Amino acid sequence: MKIPLIAAAAVVGGGCCPQAEAFVPTSSKISSAAVGRSHAGSSMLRFAEAASAAHRHHQPASARRRRSVPSALSMKSQATRVKADAPSGSAATDDVKRVYLLHEGNKDMKLLLGGKGANLCEMAKLSLPVPPAFVITTETCLEYFKEGTGNLPAALNYEAELKVLEDDTGKKFGDPSNPLLVSVRSGAPASMPGMMDTVLNLGLNDDIVQGIIDSTGNERFAYDTYRRFLNMYSDVVMNLDKEPFEEVITEIKKKKGVKLDLEMEAHDWKEVVDRFKKLNPNVPTDPREQLRGAVLAVFRSWNNDRAIRYRSYNGIPDEWGTAVSVQAMAYGNMNDGCGTGVAFSRNPSTGENKFFGEFLPNAAGEDVVAGIRTPQPLEEMAEKWPEVYAELYKYQEQLEKYYGDMQDIEFTVENGRLYMLQCRNGKRTAKASVKIAVDMVKEGTLTQSEALLRIPANQMDFFLHPTLDPSADKTLIGEGLPASPGAATGKIVFTPDDAEAMANIGEDVILVRKETTPEDIHGMKSAQGVLTALGGMTSHAAVVARGMGKCCVSGCTAADVDIAGKSLKLDGLELKEHDIITIDGSTGEVYLGTVDRRSAAEDEDFQTVLKWADEARTLKVLTNADTPEQAATARSLGAQGIGLCRSEHMFFDPERISAIRAMIVSEEKEERIRHLDTMAVFQREDIKGILKEMDGLPVTVRLLDPPLHEFLPHSIEDVQALADTVGKPLSVVQDRVAQLQEVNPMLGFRGCRLSVVYPEITEMQARAVAAAAAANKKAGLDPKPEIMVPVVSTAKELRLIVPRIQAAVADELEKAGVKLDIPIGTMMELPRACQTADQVVGTDGVEFMSFGTNDLTQSVWGFSRDDAIKFIGRYQEQGLLDFDPFARIDEEGVGGLIRTALEKARAKQPDTKVGICGEHGGEPDSVQFFHSLKFDYVSCSPFRVPIARISAGQAAASEALEEKKLYRESITNVKRAAIINAKKTDKTD
């Protein structure tokens, strides 16, 4: 499987909570050799083809002067002091390395160390101030699940690495007089923001808290930290309900008359701690027991419900597992000289090349992401701590240049000293991803091909969805932060479950929350947009919404959100569930009711990216269109023709459906032909209009395909209307309708079977195509029609039908006095047709074949695409399916049949034109697959055309870059061989 994004998971240390990473190209793959170099002898090789390659842009690291730190809790960074003789592995007897120190890993080891661990290692190599850490591998996580004992793998031993952390920090784990506290965080190879678990401040007990008070004199900090640990450990490791803990804090704040954590004093937090310990008296007091429990909890969280769901949404393999980062804590909540924040080297919403971010003084990282307090912009940090800001600014410049991409950075400031807790390619909006790519090409940071591969193709539909029309009438009722751009209108819902349920019945909804948590992931995915009362630009809601391409307004502090009462109060209005609002994620504005919108497709940078893709791709991109209006839309979006014109769709209009119904219930040929003559008028005019819109481009008209029962009337009123149309008694028409009902219509009387039984239908359609083309030709246009025969299972069907089409076309063109070439082809949508493709394309008159992957998937899997929605979700949740095969091509099963068909067809007729006209033609991974098989074209719905263009360009660009890489490697090998041979010759001489 390919992953759609490579990322780190959560921030390590005391900084910010999980943020997601940007989509990066899925087409490049790490070679097995490269993986082997980074982890010799490891079974990680079996995952090699599933991972995206890291971009290797090296920039020399500069040393930084360290400021002195007045606190007794200060530490050294492993980046500044790497011990060559440090213990390098666990004490396992099987020689499998399960634990890595930071100097032992690198950024190319994401599959083994997770995105978080790999990037921590890289920052340490660059001599950035990274708190010391060690990383437990993803394979150890898989080992835990394989053993199934509920305990850590017997071979896992991290004591040697823990001792290195003690040496590097000058502290001791479990020592009250100088305690080492750590964070324990997840870190999968692909970003899963907030989906897995984290424990901070681990290593505390009553004695150690007192030791901290004695050494720092900071009682408030000690108890604030202790309550955070007790709350998180009870929740994450012991699976206790969070609500009672939150109620304790709310009650004490209410009694004290304060709202913010900052207003709580030492004795307040001490009271919170005492009450937390009564809620859960079973938190272990032994730090090593705490650490074992936390590592187990992180491993278990790989298979929690939200993680499974997120992997399903994003195509992340279950087989990867998560790494665990254990890192010395850095504290942003000690005093007003401390803080924490999130920064981006460019604006993740707009893509503007401007350092962007937020921070909170005297706060821990989870305060930023949870939206407990609204963060301050980095500009205020520059005023408060100019030296720290300057250092942070320098690092973000260095990291962006080194990685060649916009960076998402998380940091903590502890008593004036900066600690870098994470860097990763930043998650960004569709608009930002395009602008950043274009700007980096202009700046010379990336080549055009490299930039194209950075574009998340499946997000590009953002540019096809409307934004708010500035001239529209609107009623502003609130303002927040523009967390994720775009505009969305929908009915208000207050819970993620309600959002999912409403979306499942086709309703557009806006999910309104005080703040979002990882448990809200399914509701956010289902909603058109998200509105939160709390949180900043880097809150969970903002980051996840940007990753999903969802519109989001966060930090709308004037909003009074009552989840229990299902009400939203804004601007003096009280809105209830299902009231309609509109949110603008580009401005942060909230409007009452529905607001008119307009297209965003004319974005200049987006057009530049499309131009790059068109220059690179070899696949043509056609569209599926059934009306002149759809054809015009598709052409304006760059379609190079129509790969599927479903002729039956021309009769769904109420004025026309009576004609096709009358034809269907006809019992005699003469009667049928009479109604076909009526249908021919509609058919001819529509095809004429479509050919005009696609003038000079191919238009493939598929003969009637769907089961006839889809057109039959069901209500007594409609049956009576049909009886009146055909001039027959109601009872006769009812009997005929009953005769035409089918038990399994999708495998019944449809497609070419209609042509076999009722050849007059096919003749009418062939004549309509030819007549429409002839009329356009006479009008000075350049029509290029094609006729496609559907649901073919044997070449014998084509040998019967193709001559009939040829005769009808020839007769019609002769009557019109026009010469035109109208190719005939077939849809490949049944397994038997694929297995006998040589016979199919060997039929006289067959010039092309187009894979109908919707029906082919249905027939291969034995799934009804209309009914599969009832169980496919459960299949994915339980690991039976990695993805919906109707959404993305099944390369192994359906793809295997396609390969077989291509091999046989090309062996028989090498010049046969090959395309695909299912919805898979607009899905990025599927397009890459079709490119690899050297298809001539893909065809998809009009609004997927830009996505298909970009995907096809990325597939070609990736292939070209890989070929250049292999060429360079081959040249290098030739030069090495020449040098070796020369040395051998010298020795011989």
Image: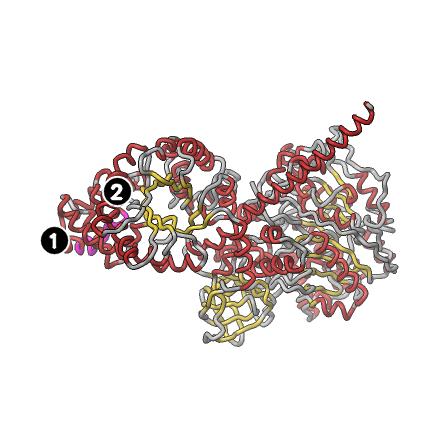
Q: Position of residue 903 (x, y in %)?
A: 45, 32
- Quadrant for the N terminus in the image: top right
Residue type, label 1: Gly
Mark number, residue 222: none
Segment tinted magenta in the rendering: 710-721
Q: Quadrant of residue 898?
A: top left
Mark number, residue 727: 1
| In front of the other: 395 or 55 | 55
Mark 2, residue position = 805
| In front of the other: 41 or 242 | 41
Question: Is disc 1 placed on a helix, strand or loop?
Answer: loop
Give the Cα separation between the discs numbered 2 and 1.
32 Å
Q: Position of residue 756 (x, y in %)?
A: 24, 38
- SS majority, magenta: helix
Q: Position of residue 654 (x, y in %)?
A: 25, 58
- Quadrant for the C terminus in the image: top right
